[in-house]
Image (tube, rainbow, N blue to C red):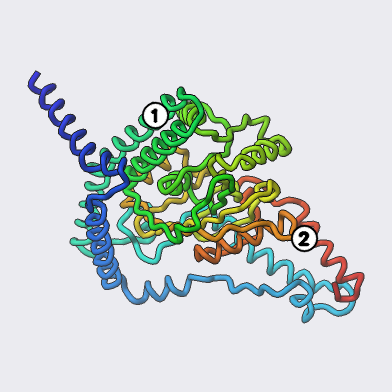
Amino acid sequence: MEGAELAGKILSTWLTLVLGLILLPSAFGVSLGISEIYMKILVKTLEWATIRIEKGVPKESVLKNSASVGIIQRDESPMEKGLSGLRGRDFELSDVFYFSKKGLEAIVEDEVTQRFSSEELVSWNLLTRTNINFQYISLRLTMVWVLGVIVRYCVLLPLRVTLAFIGISLLVIGTTLVGQLPDGSLKNWLSELVHLTCCRICVRALSGTIHYHNKQYRPQKGGICVANHTSPIDVLILTTDGCYAMVGQVHGGLMGIIQRAMVKACPHVWFERSEMKDRHLVTKRLKEHIADKKKLPILIFPEGTCINNTSVMMFKKGSFEIGGTIHPVAIKYNPQFGDAFWNSSKYNMVSYLLRMMTSWAIVCDVWYMPPMTREEGEDAVQFANRVKSAIAVQGGLTELPWDGGLKRAKVKDTFKEEQQKNYSKMIVGNGSL
């Protein structure tokens, strides 16, 4: 009995602290300054660790590492220029060297596959999984790393799991209850309150620190919000500052329970797997949603997959064929405190969440950008590329033309055929396209 009473007292004390110091401030959108103090201590610790690492690593290894960066110096000139110094007017066997060079460059370091692995860090952040080349440097640095493991797994992890459980439970219960109310302004207000409060609690479960810029450009009702995609928590990051109507496929399990509860309180747009393949049906549902200026803005990630926080890849044109106003948003995470990228081909959702909850914190910047509309004579692809370029520039990300679907699929034959056609035109046209 004494053991049960002690466990009950510990549990009640724990829940009281969580409720008083985190849950209530999160519900009202205020901060007690605890996270700010934690971040200051963390920044000072990482700065000290960086100095110790730089002192402890021999100069030879630093030179070796710096020389290995940028192993490929690419020649981005077009095909006809690259072959001009190798060939005459007709086909020559020396043309093979040009294509062999391009092929080897792609094998060693291509632009696509490196976007689906974790972003490289300038200095080790005392997280084991990002410490690829770490070796013993000093006893003090090792002791700090051990202390960090204890703090992350024995203090932060239980706290974060508790907050995540409470946040998800409140979201399911709250949206279910709100869904029983008749449609009207009261239901909409309560729905937004539940979504904002629960998402704030879930962000606190990740020790999230978010900096929002240009709030005057926040997406408005009846519009479409498009953003670059790094992680499933992108939704939480944005919903902490405003509510959105989600678009996605119907899931089963816990995710399905959350979806069914959310759609009762808010007009989210969920599709069955068979419906997702019907573009006309999807477009129709989305057009009907944005036609009602009282409904929340739709949140869409046009890349269709998670990219590793360094680049923006091809935007699918479907989101830009619907019409209406596009509200671009750029999201950029700080990898020094934790890797937010979800490599779905390597980690399942449980493993990914465990990695997130055992990192130091999730720190990111969110830039709201001026609304954009489709210009006269501009097709959906051109409009999508214009929005993508704006997001890449604002977020300091590399803009790439490749489809994020290459993460799981092979390169389309049309890409190969395009290069073959260009080469054949050079042969037939005697060296000119």
Q: Residue at image x 50%, y 57%?
A: 217
Mark identifier at residue 280:
none
Please say if 133 is above or below 73. above
Measuring from the top left, give residue 85's x and y in whole percent.
Answer: 77, 81
Q: Residue at image x 55%, y 66%?
A: 393
Disc 2 + disc 1, Cβ < 8 Å: no
Residue 177 visible: yes
* N-terminal label among 2 and 1: 1
Give whichever of 189, 194 is nearer the camera: 189
Q: Please, what secondary structure does the residue beneath circle 2 have?
A: loop
Q: Which residue is situated farthest in the top direction here?
A: 1
Measuring from the top left, give residue 172's x and y in whole percent.
Answer: 41, 28
Task: Give the total of numbered labels.
Answer: 2
In the picture provided, is 244 more to the left or to the right than 10?
right
Please say if 55 is above or below 351. below
Circle 1 Cα neighbour tier, 10 Å, few/some/many (<14 / 14–19 / ≥20): many
Q: Which residue is situated farthest in the right direction here?
A: 428
In the picture provided, is 423 more to the left or to the right than 386?
right
Q: Residue at image x 41%, y 24%?
A: 177
Q: Please, what secondary structure does the residue beneath circle 1 have?
A: helix
Task: Measure the C-alpha gap from mark 2 to mark 1.
Answer: 46 Å
Mark 2: which amino acid?
A: Gly
Mark identifier at residue 174:
1
Q: Which residue is situated farthest in the left direction here?
A: 2
In the picture provided, is 144 more to the left or to the right than 268?
left
Determine which residue is flagged by label 2: 377
Mark 1: which amino acid?
A: Gly
In the picture provided, is 127 more to the left or to the right than 189?
left
